[in-house]
Image (cartoon, helix red, strand yellow):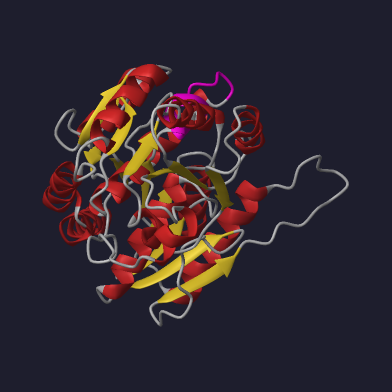
Amino acid sequence: MRIGITCYPTYGGSGVVATELGQELAARGHEVHFISYAPPIRMNLNDPNVSFHEVEVSTYPLFDHPPYTLALATKMLEVFELESLDLLHVHYAIPHSVSAMLARAMAAPRRLPFITTLHGTDITLVGTNREYLPITRFSIEQSDGVTAISQYLRTQTVKVFNIQRPIEVIPDFVNCDVYKRSEDASFRARFAPSGEPIFMHLSNFRPVKRPVDTVEIFALVRAKMPAKLVMIGDGPDRATAEYLAHEKGLREDVHFLGKQDAVHEKLASADLFLLPSQLESFGLAALEAMACEVPVIATNVGGVPEVVENGVDGYLVEPGDVAQAARHAIEILSRADRGREMGRRARAHAKEKFSAKDVVPLYERYYASVIAQSAGS
């Protein structure tokens, strides 16, 4: 198949999933064309089955804001015509599904079906804004296929938008051949030279991720035992988290690495992963940590309980309950094996339910059904 994929190329879950999906599809012999304003953060341009098509947005005095939605639709049509795409797969409803809808209309009578994957905040935040709710609902209903990354998100979409059409749940996934425990001691030697346990957090540091709570949890643990915290990513709440670490006298114990490539190499050295989000529609970062045999302490919100089994491969607490999260962390890290058995269960769970080898074929079959349905109509 020749597949066009559009996503936000930023350091967030939807862009990561879209890029990883494209790479997995390319490895399975499909021709993948990424269409966005910048190369997605994890895209491998050296892959012969992967191409990138940049959306260039012109500025005019008449427009207060560059018309990205229109420029994207035009580029989608251009790539469809040049590369003979079989379908478009857009990640995040607004504005990508609207652009795909315009591209499909411009391509007529030639068939250009498109699939919309809902990732979370496009429904829970953007879509429920009064100004965007009607167009979000319309673009979902007009999509040739719709998927959601969790049962929670499908339920929310139906509830918020009163959607009548079918929505397929295809979860986020992880390549367990890449995300796995590492025996490389160089990372640990750099950040925990005395053998201290390493906490880790990975996100885009938006307020909904509550990175400040990560520092609060770590501070409570650090008062009881030696430990280190590694914070990966960047975003609006990073400065606040850094300030809090400084105020609590933890500058030597908390390391902010910013945006990183090859995050699997870092996760593989962690002893515990913290994801204290206010809301998560799935919790991809937690899944990636689990594949690396790292127990997770996360919040009992959204789709996270579909990923982390409380008391088995991690613990779930209520948002803002940093004290309970810290108690669980101390319990895990006080064990002689630092929670290694819990980590092994986490990896087994990731491989059983969310392995790329099992999930990517679900997308392939869904693509085929949408293409066949479009041809039939």
Asked if residue 230 can be seen in this view, the reply is yes
Residue sitting at x 66%, y 32%:
243
Across and down, in percent, residue 103 comes to 51, 54
Determine whether, in the image, residue 163 is placed left or right of residue 99. left
Determine whether, in the image, residue 221 is placed left or right of residue 155. right
Residue sitting at x 44%, y 52%:
192
Does 245 appear above or below 25?
Answer: above
The image quadrant of residue 284 is top left
The residue lying toward the viewer, choosing from 79 and 160, is 160
- Of the 4 image quadrants, the one containing the N terminus is bottom left
Does 127 appear above or below 230?
Answer: above
Residue sitting at x 43%, y 61%:
189
Queried whether the magenta region covers residue 127, the answer comes back as yes
Number of marks present in the image shown: 0
The image quadrant of residue 150 is top left
Residue stretch rendered in magenta on the structure: 121-131
The residue lying toward the viewer, choosing from 128 and 280, is 280
Across and down, in percent, residue 25 comes to 30, 67
Across and down, in percent, residue 270 comes to 35, 50
Across and down, in percent, residue 81 comes to 49, 71
Queried whether the magenta region covers residue 190, the answer comes back as no
Residue sitting at x 41%, y 38%:
226
Asked if residue 167 can be seen in this view, the reply is no
The residue lying toward the viewer, choosing from 257 and 254, is 254
Determine whether, in the image, residue 50 is placed left or right of residue 370. right
Does 280 appear above or below 231?
Answer: above
